[in-house]
Amino acid sequence: MRRPRFWLVCLLLAAAASPLHAQERLNIVASFSILGDFVKNVGGDRVDVTTLVGPNGDVHVYTPAPVDAKKIADAQLMIINGFGLEGWLPRLLQASGGKAPIITATKGITPLRAGNDADPHAWQSVANTKIYVANIRDALAAADPADAPAFRANADGYLAKLDALDREVRAAIAQIPPARRKVISTHDAFGYFAAAYGIEFVAPEGVSTESEPSARDIAAIISQVKTQKIPAVFLENISDPRLIQRIAAETGAKLGGTLYSDSLTDEKGEAPTYIELVRHNIKTLTSALAD
Ligand code: ZN
């Protein structure tokens, strides 16, 4: 009659060693670097976060590698942006055979429209980022209830920092004379920033970097810069700088530096976290426009 007890011990040992045990860190895949940063802030040391599109990568035109299928197959939870940003994802998911739940971090955000498409860059409004963070907090808590109190505490702390950041953006924009709140960026990534904070962005490329602007698009932008006296043009870390350099040369608009739209930089760069990305962008905008 000892045998049943022996098996019970084996089962308990197996349970303790299983990856579902509370001591294990939740393995999460985020589709791109900015989302990865949100997940790290909420998950803290109780999660392992990997991203598919890393620092300085362009999430619009990403070509997945075999290692990405492996990351997805190993994940316990996936966090994506949605709004059509990760067009390459469905095929990758199918190839990976991954079974992890997929959480869309923009759930509850009303998208801005760009023609027939949703503008995917909702994180450029800090108020929207707070919705991303709440969605991520709830997803992590559901996937790992034992660590839910820690996720809630981390999220509360990060949300307070985001409130402070939002105030910082508004104070910075207030320094720019209203007539000068108009700039050129490479692709149309700042629609939510524009709507939230009142700076007008004009871009030769659309909301995706997928299609190159035509000669006619570029000519139209150049004449717009001249007639509307747009004071500055900005580069992006994910895009070829030559087009913007050409617009600056042909119009005399100031080359205002680099704005970070869709990607963080690596640790040594100017925007290794979302908060630093937003701070860098407002510093770059105000120093080019405030005089
Ligand atoms: Zn973009």
Image (tube, helix red, strand yellow):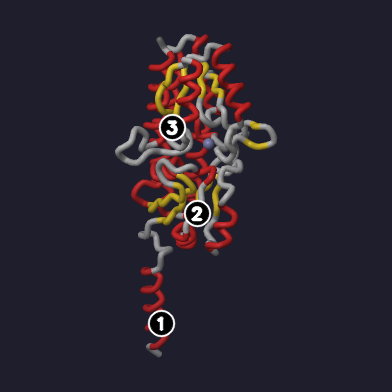
Q: Distance between the residues labelled 3 and 2?
A: 22 Å
Label 2: which secondary element: loop
Vertical comparison of 259 with 21: above or below? above
Q: Residue 64 carries which label?
A: 2
Q: Which amino acid does label 2 sit on?
A: Pro
Q: Depth check: give the residue in front, 225 or 147.
A: 225
Q: Are marks 3 and 2 in contact (CB under 8 Å)?
A: no
- Rendered-image quadrant of the N terminus: bottom left
> Which residue: 63% across, 26% down?
216
- Rendered-image quadrant of the C terminus: top left
Q: Which mark is residue 260?
A: 3
Q: Depth check: give the residue in front, 253 or 11.
A: 253
Q: How far apart are marks 2 and 1 (CA)?
A: 44 Å
Q: Is residue 244 visible?
A: yes
- For mark 1, what is the residue? 7
Where residue 163 sits, quadrant-wise, is top left
Q: Mark 1 vs mark 3: which is more N-terminal?
A: 1
